[in-house]
Image: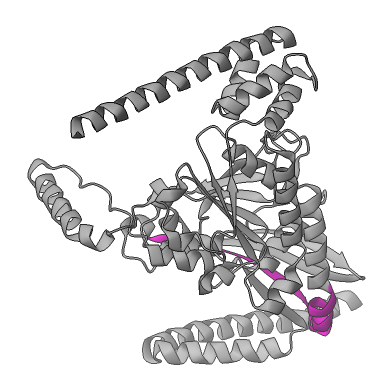
Amino acid sequence: MVSNMFSDLNMPSAKTLVSTVASVAASAIVVRSIVRDLVPYELQQYVFSSFRNIFKTFSSEIVVIIEKYDGLVHNQIYRAAGIYLGTKISPSTQMFKVSMPKKETKIKTSMASNQEIIDNFNGVQFKWRKITRQVESSTSQPSSSQTEIRFFRLSFRKKHKAMVFDSYFPFILKESKKLKQERKTLKIRTLNGDSMRSYSRGGSLWKSITFDHPANFDTLAMDTEMKRMIMDDLERFVRRKELYRKVGKAWKRGYLLYGPPGTGKSSLIAAMANYLNFDIYDLELTAIHSNSDLRKLLIGSPNQSILVVEDIDCSLEFEDRKAKEPALKSIQSSQESQAQTVNIVPQQKLSQVTLSGLFNFIDGLWSSCGDQRIIIFTTNHKDRIDPTLLRPGRMDLHIHMSYCTPCAFKTLAMNYLGITEHSFFPEINDLLEKTMVSPAEIGEQLLKNEEPEAALQGLIEFLQRKKRESEEMEARKLEGERDMGKSEV
């Protein structure tokens, strides 16, 4: 009876409450409609944002946004966070990425897009979220209408702000550097198709593949003194950060490798990369359309890297460029008019990289955008390179890659046949002094037989044949010069 009495007493109040809520909801709908119709949109946004700001002042949480790019360059904290958070995958993580690059045995884990990870540091909880969004691009090209934006969202309590900047971020940078060094696999990178369009859409300028070249200074077919000089030069360079800063120079070094084909220029580059543990960036100048694109590629290559420009004398024709421009324009206009009549797409725009643009890339103001960089140029014909490119500061050290010498042959014999001495060596060394044969040619001969004596015998016959051919060519040359002298008389 008592319970029924209380129930009877509560029923009217419950009905009143329901009717009140319904009335308030109906009033809110009416007010919202009136506001939407009568109050300007800008004023609505201002009022709503004011309310949001008021509520935020009472919030105990702070949010830090870490974007992938800081202007034109990569954000180092973003990179470090990506490596560090890859080690924080837990059983509760709903989604994450795994990969195992070629020639590696360990599986790598990394954070997936739009997923959340909780990290604990010094007893404090930090909430990370990796966000990827598609936004409208400012470019007018239809194929580039969407740009991908990537960033990390880090949230934590306001009272830990000092800890984040003084301890947590430095810890992440240090840990990521250690992790990267432990599992680093050398890469060789090349331009990523239409690199500039990819870059404008949030992509990478470079695409890579694992670099697994076995070359090192022990197996390099060069004179021992030359190898020691190059290694000493590399070691001096990597440890002289403070000296470069003290004298006011960008921390970079340029090398020119010149000599006939097959003398080991590519093998030397591979040996340098393996010696320093630096990635290689293969820079194809003919695929770059302008000086500004060249600068973006320089900025897009990280510290501790080797930029390679092969066959610099063939990559671009810098000389008399201005004189050629009218003729090039005439050819292009003719091609375009033909394309319009027969419905053919005109040829791709010619490279517009200039000599001054290359100078600025090597030792101008933009060359200081990065540390511990090595730039290597190669050529078969040093005399064809513009003299202004050869000076110190651009090509600091010139390394002549010569034909095979007795010292280089000894290394090749060890590499291919596993021997350091043989009775045939004196005869081979004598023939090498009198013939011009590349290390690549010697190596090819040594591959023909696994038996050392037979392989060396075949090499002697090859060198004797090359010597005869050289002598015959020289005799024909002298005979031709005598005939020319007689005709002039």
Of 65 and 474, which appears nearest the observer?
A: 474
Of 128 and 191, which appears nearest the observer?
A: 191
The residue that appears at 7% across and 45% down in the rendered structure is 341
Residue 171: image location, x then y, percent: 83, 68
What residue range appears in magenta? 145-167
In this rendering, does residue 434 appear at all? yes
Q: Is residue 132 above or below residue 467?
A: below
Of 155 and 172, which appears nearest the observer?
A: 172
Residue 131: image location, x then y, percent: 61, 62
Identity of the residue furthest to the left in this view: 341
Residue 123 as seen in the image, left or right of residue 296: right
* Image quarter (top left, top right, bottom left or bottom right) of the N terminus: bottom right
Splitting the image into 4 quarters, where does residue 388 fall?
bottom left
Q: Is residue 46 magenta?
A: no
Residue 59: image location, x then y, percent: 74, 85
Q: Is residue 148 magenta?
A: yes
Residue 369 as seen in the image, left or right of residue 92: left
In this rendering, does residue 89 appear at all? no
Splitting the image into 4 quarters, where does residue 426 fall?
top right
Identity of the residue furthest to the front in this view: 489
Splitting the image into 4 quarters, where does residue 433 fall?
top right
Residue 267: image location, x then y, percent: 62, 37
Task: Identify the colour scheme used.
Answer: one colour
The residue that appears at 71% across and 32% down in the rendered structure is 407
How many numbered dots are placed on residues in this image? Answer: 0
Q: Is residue 202 above or below residue 247?
A: above
Of 238 and 103, which appears nearest the observer?
A: 238
* Image quarter (top left, top right, bottom left or bottom right) of the C terminus: top left
The residue that appears at 37% across and 86% down in the rendered structure is 37
